[in-house]
Image (tube, rainbow, N blue to C red):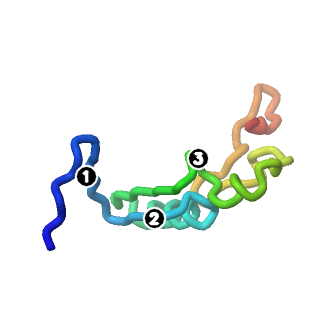
Amino acid sequence: MPMPPPASDDVEISCDYLVVGAGTSGMSFVDTLLTENATATVVLVDRNSRPGGHWNMAYPFVRLHQPSCFYGMNSLPLGKRRDRRGREVFDA
């Protein structure tokens, strides 16, 4: 059965990888994927309007309680900036 033509507000997107879920696992997978293949095109989709996956809905009261240099992705170390005195600058 042929596909119906797209509606006028539909957009066709082409990619190498489609990742469903912008939670910790989905974002970590994309980070590793792009670290190993920088030319890959990735579309990351989630039913929520922001990253975080299930945690956004189930635990809206949970917030990180530590400076961002203590968490992040393997490909992007955070908290490596220094001020004039050489002290580490923590991202807020």
Could you say which is closer to the camera, residue 4 or residue 62?
4
**Residue 49 horizontal/vertical position (percent):** 56, 46
In the image, what residue occupies the spot 66% across and 60% down?
Answer: 54
Compare marks 2 and 3 and give the one earlier in the sequence.
2
Q: Residue 2: which quarter of the image? A: bottom left
- Name the kind of residue labelled 2 in the image: Val
In this view of the protein, which residue sits in the foreground, 52 or 75?
52
- Residue at label 1? 12
The amino acid beneath tag 3 is Arg
Element carrying mark 2? strand
* Residue at which label 3 appears: 50
Give the CA distance from mark 3 to mark 1.
22 Å
Between circles 2 and 1, the one closer to the viewer is: 1
Q: What element carries label 3?
A: loop
- Residue depicted at x 48% and y 64%: 20
- Could you tell me if the residues under marks 2 and 3 are in contact, i.e. CB atoms within 8 Å? no
Residue 43 location (% of width, % of height): 40, 56
